[in-house]
Image (tube, rainbow, N blue to C red):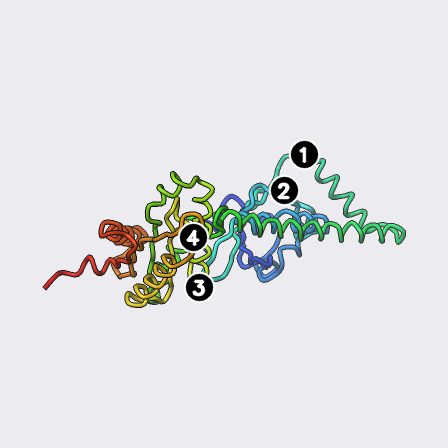
Amino acid sequence: MDERLKYAPCGYMSITHEGIIMDVNQTFLDKMGYTQADLVHKHLESIMTIANKLIFHSYFYPFINLNGQVEELFINLKDSSGQSIPYLLNGKQFISEGVEIIDCILMQMGNRIDYELELRSAKKQIEEAYWEKDQALEKLQQIHMEIEKKQAELVEMNTLLVELSTTDKLTGLKNRRFFQEKLEEQIALYSKTGQPFSLFILDIDHFKKVNDTYGHQTGDYVLEKLAGILKSHSRKEDIAARYGGEEFVLILPNMDVLESKILAENLRQTIASSAWEIIGSLTVSIGIATITPQDSNTSILKNADQALYASKANGRNRVTHIMNLNEKPL
């Protein structure tokens, strides 16, 4: 740990997604009366009361799973003497060498505000409820089961929200934001391993005419059906996304120049030969770029777009790879 972080004016620790403490700074250890050996490789919940464990499960994990961070979680932690010390916890998730780590900043609360008093009182009542006599045990277990059920529902809802945030509502394909993230990941993977990939930009020919002639409802039908064709022609590892309007993009891992041209031509022919109710026929133009050592996420997109423009300029309903444009005549 960096020396400045080790003695920062606030507590710091890093934990795994399961809550195991991986590192903790000296500031926190000094304030709480612990040593590194007392906490490292122990579960964070080992220094929490039962009530705080409940709060931690109901708030911290769902927000980390949904947002990747938690801000100003009020929580009490037990020091080495067993005394409950109030903290405000800020946490943020990141991936290090494929392992998920959560960094936590812990600010000790020096003043007791009204909200803190109410929260402490509520937590005390929960702790007392856990230790009530046998006649209250059945009710307490029922409450605990209900909390677990609500927590599971919250996690399920959070998963759905994450899916919705990366999906195009009309077509069901991934959206532009998700595509940009995956493109950056592919370029990073190429830099490390040299694993090639190709990128398609696909544009519907004369789509404005479809909307103007048959209406936007028919235009939406065309976009949805085309999305279905792209899904059926995509491998499990491929990323198909709606880039915007009538433009679609595909990321194709482990696909070189020749393979990408063959796939694009098959896709073009499939779309052209499909039955398009109401409008009768539909064609697309496709631009392709395959990653090179000089490429960034911006340049490979630009190259694919330039190839798409060439397909449009040369009569539409065709496939162009940027390599064909860059070839110099003999």
Q: Which residue is mark 4?
A: 276
Q: Which residue is mark 2?
A: 74
Q: CA distance from mark 1 to mark 4?
A: 62 Å
Q: CA distance from mark 4 to mark 3?
A: 28 Å
The first of marks 2 and 4 along the sequence is 2
Which residue is more in the foreground, 38 or 254? 254
Q: Nearer the viewer, mark 1 or mark 4?
A: 4
CA neighbours of label 2 inside 10 A, class few (<14), some (14 to 19), many (20+) = many
Q: CA distance from mark 3 to mark 1?
A: 49 Å
Q: Are marks 1 and 2 in contact (CB under 8 Å)?
A: yes
Q: Nearer the viewer, mark 3 or mark 1?
A: 3
Residue 268 is situated, as x and y percent measured from the top left of the image, at 34, 59
Q: Which residue is mark 3?
A: 237
Q: Nearer the viewer, mark 2 or mark 3?
A: 3
The first of marks 2 and 3 along the sequence is 2
Residue 119 is situated, as x and y percent measured from the top left of the image, at 70, 39
Which dot marks residue 115? 1
In the image, what residue type sits under mark 4?
Trp
Q: CA distance from mark 2 to mark 3?
A: 42 Å
The first of marks 1 and 4 along the sequence is 1
User: Would residue 200 be found to the left or right of residue 152 on screen?
Assistant: left
Look at the numbered disc 1 and give the secondary structure of its residue. Answer: helix
Q: Are marks 4 and 3 in contact (CB under 8 Å)?
A: no
Determine the residue located farthest toward the left in the rendered image: 330
